[in-house]
Image: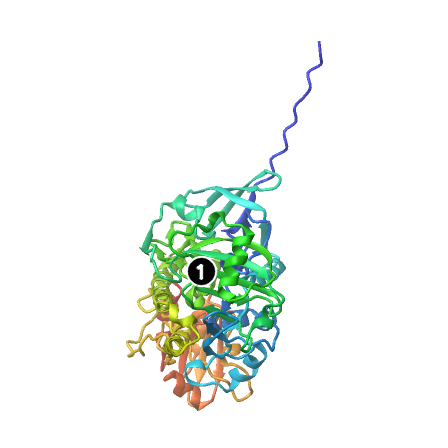
Amino acid sequence: MKDDIPMFSQPQPPLLETDVLIAGGGPCGLMLANELGRRGVRCLVVDAKPGTAFNPQANATQARTMEHFRRLGFANEIRELGLPADHPTDIAYFTRYSQHELSRISLPTAAEALVKIKAMTGSWSAAELPHRVSQKFVEQALRRHAQAWPSAEVRYGWALERFVDDGNTVSATIRSTEANLPQEVKAQYLVGADGARSFVRRQLGIEWGGVTGIQREFMGGKMFAVYLRAPTFVSVLQHPKAWMYVAVNPQRRAFMASVDGKSEYAFHAALRPGEDADNWTEDDARRVFAEAVGVELPIEILSMGTWLAGHALVAKNFQRGRVFIAGDAAHLFTPTGGLGYNTAIEDAVNLGWKLASVVRGQAPAQLLDSYAAERKPLAERNTGYARRFADSVGLFTAKSELDETSERGQAERELAAEYFNQHARLEFNIPGVTFGGRYDGSPIIVGDGAELPPDEPNTYTATASPGGRPPHAWLDDGHSLFDKFHSEWTLLVLGPDVPSTDAFEVAAQALSVDLRVVRLPQTSLSELYEAPLALIRPDQIVAWRGTTADEAQTVLMRVTGR
């Protein structure tokens, strides 16, 4: 008789406790980890993928997002990523890339942006200009900075398997995708930044609102994506290099963004009726690419797949108890205007300071109710703008004459050029979309009833009326006004003749509000803000403005959710 062989089970790891569990290691989850980590709040990011994105994905970082990266101290680092500093960032429209250019909008290079921004006024008075950089590079930078915070932990190769909100905490199980080991986690809050197919949103039973399945000749329906190397592509161009190349012809509509400014490109082609790209081979990818270029080129295919355009969806709720959703889990865009990734970054910025305030005992839990109140209307606004841009480019019919070498072809190209000159400025010169988002009606904004400028995509009129981005200015010492803001709450005291701020300082101390008073005597600033006092939130939103500090305690209680 054989001796019994004892069976050993792997010991269960001890319970892991954190303040905020973040499902999803894309831009939204990583940005949230940076917002929490810099404030000393414990957070754990989990993502089933082995690491940050391999595919380029989003390709445009808008100016407001760059201002947030500046606030965190790494805007210049982001601006050095992706394209070389002197690479054009133009958007150009062609019949086919090797043939007729129809239209072009020229934008500053990364090097020029650093210089030009200091002289720009009006709609583009800002601390930063947009930057053309693939999401894969941004994620790598966000991950490096998140992991540098002692209170933040980032685990790729770990999937959120289950969670339960018991009213006081969130209990969850995460599992290593490589070792198949479970880990029990207890958190105060859970944030689902886990993408379009969000496990968190589905578990909460939150439905989509809005529209999907919008069909267009281009940017509506299934799209075929190829991440490729084409080192000889520039040699077939008859026109200057660009950042974004758009193909407009009756055979194949497509767009392509330069990833590294040398040989790597993110190519996306619309499918024609009856085509099924899910089973396409690399030979099919080469054929479709040649249809957009106009000639065959040797290419190396790094990855390929399909995705759906035609979304304008916003979740009906952004929060259930101690669980929140953000980023693509909360809103889905057709990626015109680059608004999906940039809206996701602002979700993280908005939620980050609020979670930190509550976790650290500086604000009551009801402050968190303002997250959905503020971000859901913004998501609806932004998906609406993206749909408008997609309609503009996608409903244009590319006639067969566009390819002709004839008077008829020339006439058709002139019509197309006129159309895309207008469209390019609609989609790619969008300071109004970028800077004009507002939180009017928020329970933590002290509105002043001022008449607001119109919300238009291509123009932005600065206003210090509470609920929006603070008006920007370059100071006499060459610094951006935004660089003077405190990392938490800032009370701007503007102009030469100012009221006492003692009441704000006393109230802030009593309410545990980390407030810094910043005094700037320039008369132009008090004129810009139309008040001597303005209270700026940690996410650089005007919370209140006024002429005296008489209601300081009431104001601070309101803006911190009390």
Q: Secondary structure at mark 1?
A: helix
Q: Nearer the viewer, residue 225 or 274?
A: 274
Q: Which quarter of the picture shows residue 9?
A: top right
Q: Nearer the viewer, residue 281 or 265?
A: 281
**Colouring of the image:** rainbow
For residue 370, above or below residue 13 = below
Residue 43 visible from this viewpoint: no
Outermost residue toward the front in this view: 406
Residue 129 visible from this viewpoint: yes
Q: Position of residue 146 (x, y in %)?
A: 58, 59
Q: Is residue 150 left or right of residue 397?
A: right
Q: Position of residue 243 (x, y in %)?
A: 53, 72
Query: Where is the C terminus found, in terms of image quarters?
Result: bottom left
The residue under label 1 is 351
Q: Which quarter of the picture shows residue 81?
A: bottom right
Q: Is residue 283 left or right of residue 388?
A: right
Q: Nearer the viewer, residue 299 or 321?
A: 299
Q: Nearer the viewer, residue 216 or 363?
A: 216
Q: Residue at x 48, y 74 (%)?
A: 91
Q: Is residue 399 left or right of residue 247?
A: left
For residue 179, above or below residue 544 = above
Q: Position of residue 65 (x, y in %)?
A: 49, 69
For residue 162, above or below residue 533 = above
Q: Which quarter of the picture shows residue 143?
A: bottom right
Query: Where is the N terminus found, in terms of image quarters?
Result: top right
